[in-house]
Amino acid sequence: MCEIKNINSTAITQNKLKFSIYKTIDFLPYMKELDVPHRHNYNMILLNERNSGKQLVDFEECIIEPFSITCLHYGQIHQWLDYDKIEGYIIVFENDFFALRHQNYELSEFSFLTYRHKIPYAKVSKEQFENVKSIALWMLKEFSGKGNNFDKHLYSLLNLMLLELDRLFEPNNKNTEFSQSLQLIYHFEELIDKYFREKHFVKDYASVLHVRPNYLNAVCNEVTKSSAGDLIRNRIILEAKRLLIHEKKTASEIAYELGFTDNSYFGRFFKKYENNTPDGFKKMFLKN
């Protein structure tokens, strides 16, 4: 069983900015240290231009193809599996780095940096990749040169890159009504991530958001194709899996940590949505 490592961005960025950009060949020493399961306190964007690799993101194996983009957000559990041949760029930044410049524009507005995309991965055309790569090269120049106001340039370039990625991950035009629905989902997802241990019911979140439970559920179905209850349950199940595999905790300890007063109910809950018991899932995952 692998115990999870918690990796702080300063160990990767080596600066107080809470931001860094690397060519993958220069990031290799970190990859070798992080080829075990680890949890990020930062966001990471991988732009892979050449060759292939493999990584594990929250129990899902993810192939790294040429002309592909992978986005990992705060809190995800990640492991590099096959990485020494990929060629591209890696951008690392904390939420705080973005917030310093864009106080009224939250990162949660970018769906690929939320739990809505289990593994935000996109295989794109060469032209699309070149558009994003050009921003990365500009970032690299500013980051390496450290000229006047280089940090402000980096804030703006990061925002530009995220907007470009938003076109790739959310290609449909967002009318005003749909944008309002997205805002509600963003806030709902933030609340889930903050309170999933103690709030298990849609009505609890609807009350905080000042909407009716039925309305919240309808918006979730429209935007995410999942019910509000499913979004809450998915987050609880994800954390249960993390605790089972990486924290060496028993099912009863996990039940208590996730706010279940009845251990047997937690077992039934897990089995209903995973078609396996907690112990069965642990044994199957470690065997594979």
Image (cartoon, rainbow, N blue to C red):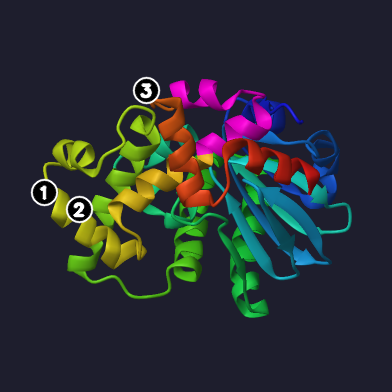
Could you say which disc has been placed on residue 212 in the image?
A: 1
Q: Gap between marks 2 and 3, in whole Å?
A: 26 Å
Residue 199 or residue 161, whichever sits in front: 199
Name the foreground residue: 178 vs 149: 178
Which of discs 2 and 3 lies nearer the camera? The answer is: 3
Quadrant for the N terminus in the image: top right
Q: Does label 3 or label 1 sit earlier along the sequence?
A: 1
Q: Amino acid at mark 2?
A: Leu
**C-beta proximity under 8 Å, tags 1 and 2:** yes
Amino acid, disc 3 = Thr
Sequence-wise, which precedes: disc 2 or disc 3?
A: 2
Amino acid, disc 1: Arg
Q: Residues within 10 Å of mark 3 (few under 14, many from 20)?
A: few
The residue sitting at 64% across, 43% down in the picture is 281
Q: Is residue 241 magenta?
A: yes
Mark pair 1, 2: CA separation = 6 Å
For mark 3, what is the residue? Answer: 261
When asked about the image quadrant of residue 135, the answer is bottom right
> Bounds of the magenta span?
239-257
